[in-house]
Each structure stands twice: as structure tokens, then as C-alpha cells.
Amino acid sequence: MNNEQRFSIKARTCTLKYNQQDPSSIILDDQTGYVIPIYQRPYAWTEDQLRKFIADIFISFWGNDKNAASEPMFIGTMQLSPTKKNETFDIIDGQQRLTSFLLLFKVLQLKYPACEELSRINLNWLSTEVNNKTQQHYLDEFIHKDTLFFDRDSQNPYDRNAFVINKHINEHTSDSEIDDPMAGDFAFDINKFILYLLSSVYFVVIETQAGLSKILQIFNAINTTGLDLNGGDIFKIRMYEYLTSKLGLDQEVFNDISALYKKIDECNTNIGYVFSDMRGILNIYQYILIAKFKLPVGLYNYSSDRFFEHLFDTIIGNQPQEHFKNNVDNLTLSLKDIERIIEVRFEWEKRWKAATDFTLENACAFNFIWMSRYSRYWELAFVVIYRTYQQPGYWENMLNFIVKLNKLFFIYSVRFQKLKGEIYYGLMHHVIDAIVNRSLDDAIRLIDNAIGTEQQHNNGWYDLNFFLTENLTENTKRKNLICRMSSMLHEDYYSNNAKELQEIRKQLFENPIDIEHIQSFHDKDLKKRELIWQEWQENINSLGNLMILEQHYNRSISNSEYKDKAITYAKSKFSIVKNHHDRYSLWDLSKCIERKETEKNRILQYLFN
């Protein structure tokens, strides 16, 4: 088959049923059937969209004042693709609008049973394969209704939206349907209205014949009025194409794909909030695929949307992409792998929400990674669980890995104050490869080697001791990481008391806090400020003089003297603040230097021992 036979685009202007300019360019010709393919979304227009749909029709029909001449209405484009059945087309774009017209005709048939033109409109021209024919069941149920009663709370989306359509028709016609010969042009003429719908509402119908990937490409190029396809939607369609055209599975496999999306929705419902969608799951799958099939490590930097777009283009054979074409001969995609990732993601979120099976150290490790310059790699927790799921000790092993990862990222975020390519790219790519292809022990050995020893990080220009303690206010990320770490280490961070853990973690990472200058930088006594700066110099912004404090307490004490601040410190929920209050009745430079050394050693002991 040559390219012209495989690929064609034809466009024409159509009306619904009557077209004086081209009688063949009609949509409802009593012979053509329209199918919503299995990979499409369900009918999903909301009341806002239906309100605009009905309003636009009536304004075009009789103007804002109901006394204007009718004007033709352009409803947008509709993309169709011929099926293997004669006179049947798949609806690629336009199903929401076309379905809404079907609902409109059904509502009008029930409202105006005496209208002959309405009675001649059959409603059997639309069918749907979406959601394992569940949508078709709802559609059949709706089409066979014989009473003008629609339930706005119905499970049937067609019945539910028919209620909305009926409501808005009533709003537009309520002052026009009166038995009054004086009503004149304001009287609603149903026959005239139906004739208008069938002859003066215009679509540009684009008929495309090509493979599914090319059809989707055309859709993305022309779609301007429908619901945008996001990366998760596109993955569903491309995975369906891959499984049917590449692996030879039948179209029923789409039900298995849809079941994964349903599983994500059910997990979100069980948790009580949306913690992930398919794109989030694919972020994790991307790590696994790149490592498992030895794809170029540069692909780790692709967004999941771009990664899977290029991957499918290559493995389905339409447009081989440079980074993929020499590396995908043995690559296979698995619905079971995706299902396992969903289960892993849900398992983690369920435990995170309940604060079970985490110590304070574990929980804070995640937050520290999110705060670090290497935050993207927190998702490796899910890759670790995926590889060891339900094996003995899998959860504890994952938590140990995350604690190690936090220490690594903390050291390099603090010491260098910028991304280090040797960690972000080099090391972490080797770590992912170890997790997926070898063992978690190998991955941890790589991390331990990069953490190294205290001595290795305390030589040369980037001296860890210096960056842990001095000039913290010059870099906000460094200051926040260090002061929070210092605070955590004053708590019982091996505790796994769920209620206590949640409270401390929220105080540290979610509730509003400030980094408090114990000796105020801008002392309340203006006469003392210059003398304080001269005496304290760099120590005023050092770890010795800084600590976490609840924001409302910090703002209340402002630049007060230490003896006044100490009264408020006693009220803090942070152990580091309460300990400070108990230990230091007075505050001066010597105590600051002493505290700086103590807190530095506490952090170093934690990181390297």
C-alpha cells in the first residue's frame, strides 16, 4: 500500500440534515453510523459547557432580544475516521458536541411530540465502545426513555445532562411559549427552530484515513474546542495501539488499560485526595524502563510525556526517534508492571497518611529530599519498593535507602549550594541501574561511597564545616536545610509514635516557621546595633545564633532582648527551642560559639556515623 492509500485528509462543510449548497454534505443521512471508539473518554460535558452550547444556539436562532433574524452557526470541527464497516466512522474529535445534539433532539422530541420534523429524526446513528460498553448501555437506556423526566443525580451521564439541557431550553423559551396571538415574533416556533438546527448549524468535517498515531497527530494539530488530551490520555491511546498493532492483542485489551485508570481513581478515593494520576505513575515507570532496557541515560531528563511520545513513535514504527531507535529492539511494555507501580504508590501514600511504619527520621528524610537540590529523586523510593515489593523487609530496606539518600543530598546541597553534575547525573544514574538490574545493597554501597567520610568533605575550598556553620543567611536553601536538620536532631527521631511524628513533622515542614536570630540582627536598642555587629561579626548569622521558631512566636518577639525572648521560647513545641531556653539563661558571643560547635558536631555525627 502506498503512502497516498495509507494516509488521506478530506475536509468539507456539513450541516446536520439539510444542505442546499451540497445535499451530500450532511451528517444525519439515515445511513451513516458514528462510533465513539473504545479509547475515547466517556461523555463528559459539564453544565457550564451545556449552558453555553444551548445559549449559543438560541442567540444564533433569534438573537439576544428574540426578535432578530436567524444567523448560521458554526459549531466547530469534527474529525472522523472510516472503520472497517461500510458507512461507519469513528469519531476522533467532536463526540461531546455530537452527543449533545443527540440529547437535545431527544429532549425536544419528548417536549414536542406533535412536531413532525422531530419525529422523523432517528437517534440510532450514534454508538459508543467506551468503558466496556457501559456507556452504550446508558445511551440505549436514555434513547428509549418515553417520559420527560430526567434525573440530575442519575448515574447515567446522558440522563443527567438531558436534565441540564431541558432546564436551559426552558430558560430560553419560558416567556415565549404562550398562547397569545399578540406575542408576535417572541412566540417560540418549534418547527422553525428544528429546521434551523438541521439546516443552519455548520460543522467542518475532517475525514482522516491513517494509522492511529497519525490520526492522533492530526487531532492534536486541529483540536481547539474539545477537551485537551493530556499525557495520561495520550498514553492510554498509544498503549492501546502498541498492544493491538505491535503485540497483536484484540481490542478488548483496552478494557485492561482502562482498568488501570480506574484503579488509580479508586486509590485516590480510598486515600481521600488525589495523590497521583497516570502521569505520576509513568514518571516512575520511566526510571524502570530506561534502566531495565539500557536506554541512553539522557532520557532521564525527559518529561514523561515527551519520553513516552518518542518511545511509542519508535516502537510502533512511525517515526523512530534518535535516542530510542538503536535501543528498543527488546523493549516491551507491560500492563502488569504499571499495575504494580500503582499498588506500590498507593501502599506508600496509605502509610504516609497514617504515619505508620515511619520513624521521625524516615518521614523527615523525605521532606529533606524534597527541599534539597536533588528533589526529583524522591520517586526512587517507589522504584525500590517496585523491585522488592512484599519481599521480607522490603519496607525497612526502602526507608534505609531514603535515609542514606537524604544524607547524600543534604551534604552536597549544603556544601556546594548548586547541583553537582557528578551526583545529579553520574552517580544517580548508576544508583538507578543498580536498583533495577542488580540489588539495593549495590545501590546503597554507591551512595555510601559518595557520602564518604567527614575528612573527605572538609578539605579544599568547599569545606563542609564552614558551610554548615557560617553565613547561613546568604543562601536560603542552605539555611533552611541546616536549621531544620539541627532541629530534628533534638527530637526523638527514632520514635515511630504516629501522632507525635505527624505533629513534629508538620511543625518542621508544613506549618509557618521562621529562622530566629537568638541575638537579634537588628537589635531593638538602636544604640547597641553597631556595637553588636562589630563584636559578633560573622557569628551573628552562624549556626550558633540561628534556630527554628514558630512564625507567630518569632513575629511576636521581633527584635527584643534575649531575656524577653526566652519567655516565649519556653512556649515553643520544638525541642531545640525548649532545650535552648533550659540551658541558656543568658546569651552572649561565647555561648553562641559554644553552641555553633555543638550543633555542627551533632549534624556531622548524624551524617557520617
Image: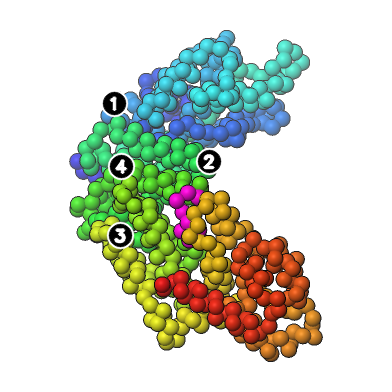
State the residue position of label 1.
85
Q: Amino acid at mark 1?
A: Lys
Magenta stretch contains residue 329:
no
Q: Amino acid at mark 3?
A: Leu
Given residues 267 and 93, the one toward you in this image is: 267
In the picture, measured across the screen, residue 341 lies left or right of residue 513, that is left
The local secondary structure at tag 3 comes to helix
Bounds of the magenta span? 355-364
Tell me the residue at 29%/62% (across/down).
441
Q: Earlier in the sequence, mark 1 or mark 2?
A: 1
Residue positioned 67% across, 76% down in the render: 584
Of tags 1 and 2, the one toward the viewer is: 2
Residue 393 position within the rendered picture, expressed as x and y whole percent measured from the top left:
34, 52
Q: Which residue is mark 3?
A: 440
Choose top left, top right, bottom left or bottom right for residue 257: top left
Q: Which mark is residue 335?
A: 4
Q: How many marks?
A: 4
